[in-house]
Every structure is written in C-alpha cells, then in structure tokens.
Image (cartoon, coloured by chain):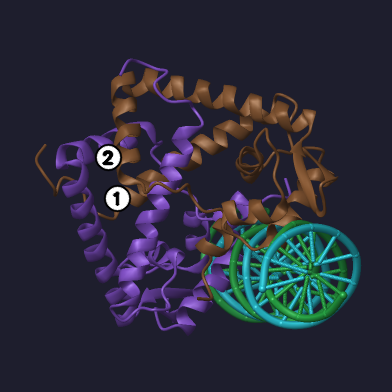
Chain colours: A brown, B purple, C cyan, D green
Amino acid sequence: MLSNSSRPGHALPLLLLRAFQELIDELHTELAHTGHPDARPMHGFVLQAVGPEGTTAVELARALGVTKQAAGRTVAGLEEQGYLVRATDPADSRRKVVRLSTRGQDLLERSAAVLDDLRRRRADTVGADRLAALEDTLAALGGDSGPRWDAPAWFGTRPD
Amino acid sequence: MLSNSSRPGHALPLLLLRAFQELIDELHTELAHTGHPDARPMHGFVLQAVGPEGTTAVELARALGVTKQAAGRTVAGLEEQGYLVRATDPADSRRKVVRLSTRGQDLLERSAAVLDDLRRRRADTVGADRLAALEDTLAALGGDSGPRWDAPAWFGTRPD
DNA sequence: CTAGAATAGACAACAACGTTGACCGTTCGA
DNA sequence: TCGAACGGTCAACGTTGTTGTCTATTCTAG
C-alpha cells in the first residue's frame, strides 16, 4: 500500500464513471417505482439547476454549458412532461421565467431522498468514514465549477 | 466530521462526474498536443476494449453495451481515422477481425502515459495515500463489471 | 450429407441531441 | 429616439444509437 503506483492511471476514470453510472442507474430504478417512470438522468440535474427561484432558458444554458437553443428545447421537453412551468416575466416581456411545477418539485424531493438513501447504503458498505473521505478527496480534486451537461456531444466520437 | 450526514446524497454523483470529466478533458488536451488532436473520449475506451488480441464488431458491441450496428459504425470511424485495421478472418469468413494499427497502439500508449501522469499530479495534490484510498473505496463501491459506453443514449433526456 | 438455425456484418429509415445561422420582439443606453 | 444588446424560437445540419431487414457464412441436427 505504497505511494503512487498502486494502480495504473487508466483505472481512475473507469472507477469514477462506474461509480457514477451505478448511482444514477439505481436512482432512476427507484424513481421509476415512485411515480416517475419517465424521469431521465438529465432531468434531476436540470431541475436542480432551475432551482426554487426559477430561471430562464439563457441562464440555464450558461449554467449547463450548452447553447440557448439546446437549453430551450430541454426546457420545452421538461415542460411537456409536466416538470416545469413557463411564464412570461411581467417585468420584461422578453424573458420567460421557468419554474418547477409541483411534479417537478416532487421529483427533486424524491431524488434527494433516494440519493440520501443510496449514499447511506454505500456508507454501510464501505464505512461512513471512508465514504466521507472519498467525498472530501473528490472535492479537493475537482475544480470549483460544477460538471458540464453537454455529455452526449462531449462524450461523442466524431467532431472536434 | 461525523458519520453519514456530512454531505447531502446529491453531492456524490456531481463530485464523481466532475472528477471524471476533468480527467478526460485534461487527457485529451494533452493528447491533442502529442499527435492526436482528433482523439475523442470514446476512442481510448474503445481501443482499450479492442485490446492487443483484436476483436470483432459484435464482440465489441457486447463489451460496450451497444448494438452491433453502433459498434460497427464506431469501428468504421476509427478505421477511417487510422486507429484500427480490419481484416477478414481466414478461419471464418463471416468475421472481420479488428486490430489496433500502429497509430492506435500509439494512442493507447500515450493515453496510458498521460493518465499515469494525471494520476501522479493528483497524488501530489491530495496526497498519494488519499488518492489510493479513493481508488480502493471506488473499487469497493463499484460492481465487478466495467462501465457501459452507451453514454449518449443512457444520459439522454427523452426515450425510455 | 443436407436443411434449418444461428452468427457476423452491412444497409436503410428513424428518433434524439447539440450546434450553427437566421429571425423577431423587447429593452436599454448613448 | 434610434441602434445595439438581449431573450426566445424556428429551420437546417451532422453525429450517434436504435430497430428492422437482408446477405453470406458457419454450425448442427436429422
């Protein structure tokens, strides 16, 4: 158990991705059983980005690191599925304020509850101290900004 | 710094994704500077899945968790970019064995070297012991199987 | 030995996603 | 007041994975 060559460097991204995927998969399996069978990985993240204050498509686009068109479409989809509500800002008729619907809030609350539970389960598996240490180390590694959400394009194979 | 409620459950996936994205981004920034400007996140993973033994599109599809058509297209793209070579199996004319080209091997070797370096840099940042502990914890958390590679579809917003 | 099932690969049509480019209506500031 | 900036939407395009279909080859009963 010595210094820096215990594992090859290429293992780290695989371990990180695997842990992330398992978490998200379990989350959505659970959500599907509690009234949100149509929830998708992105939804929770977007809804969280919307927040209780509400936002606009452009703000969201900036926060998510995608174009305003992409954000607009995502919002339209989430609205169609009943997770978001859009309304024109009375103070500025250009803006359309996006807010969480009741269903959206419910998804967010359930997601938080499930994730807390999943975290607890993992704490039971590896030990609460080790899990907390993992989070601390990840926080120390990661920059200050949150992740980007252009995952499909970012992860894609082709263009530059 | 006590037990299980030090961080909310929803922080964990964000921390994991963020760490993963940073790692992959830095890897490809580095690769772009060393003769592989057209390398994409998926490439290294696919090439690693091909391995020194070679495979076929169908095998690859199974390993990557996508359809054989998708795997076939990916292989075609990688071949076009000079990372892979395809040849008909003399023992079974249905099969077309996919192997790494010299350029493909080079990408894989450089990727390994860069990832080792990135890991070393992180070990310097947070401490070799903490990084090793992080890897151990992640390994304990993750199932035995590797991650899936249908990331775009899996992460997507729409269908079920 | 032969006929039907299984396999490997390819082609076409489709849906989903993000991107660029263009456009309209609204707001703000010189 | 008039032009620039901003928010939002529409259309076109490229990439990616998917399902469905088809051919060629190999395997396996009978």
Q: Residues within 10 Å of mark 1 (few under 14, many from 20)?
A: some
Q: Residue at x 33, y 64 (%)?
A: B27
Residue closer to the observer: B97 or B5: B5
- Quarter of image, res B107: bottom left
Q: Which of the chains bears the disc numbered 1?
A: A
- Do marks 2 and 1 share a chain? no
Per the image, the residue denoted by label 1 is A11
Identified at 52% across, 78% down, the residue is B76
Q: Please tell me which residue lies in front, A28 or B95.
A: A28
* Circle 1: residue type: Ala
Q: Position of residue B126 (x, y in %)?
A: 21, 42
**In the picture, which quadrant includes the N terminus of chain A?**
top left
Residue A56 in the image, given as x and y percentages of width and height = 72, 49
Give the secondary structure at mark 2.
helix
| A35 on left or right of B38 | right
Q: Residues within 10 Å of mark 2 (few under 14, many from 20)?
A: many
The answer to whether residue B77 is seen in the rendering is yes
Residue B135 - label: 2
State the residue at coordinates (45%, 64%).
Answer: B42
The quarter of the picture where residue C27 lies is bottom right
| Residue type, mark 2 in image | Glu
Per the image, label 1 sits on a secondary structure element best described as helix
Residue B37 position by quadrant: bottom left
Point out residue A150 in the picture as x, y percentages from the top left corner.
Answer: 57, 58
Q: Is residue B77 left or right of residue C20?
A: left
Q: Could you tell me if the residues under marks 2 and 1 are in contact, i.e. CB atoms within 8 Å? A: yes
Residue A100 placement (x, y as % from top left): 74, 35
The relative height of residue B32 versus residue A69 in the rendered view (above or below) is below
Residue B94 visible to the viewer: no
In the image, residue B10 above or below residue B21: above
Q: Is residue B129 left or right of residue B145?
A: left
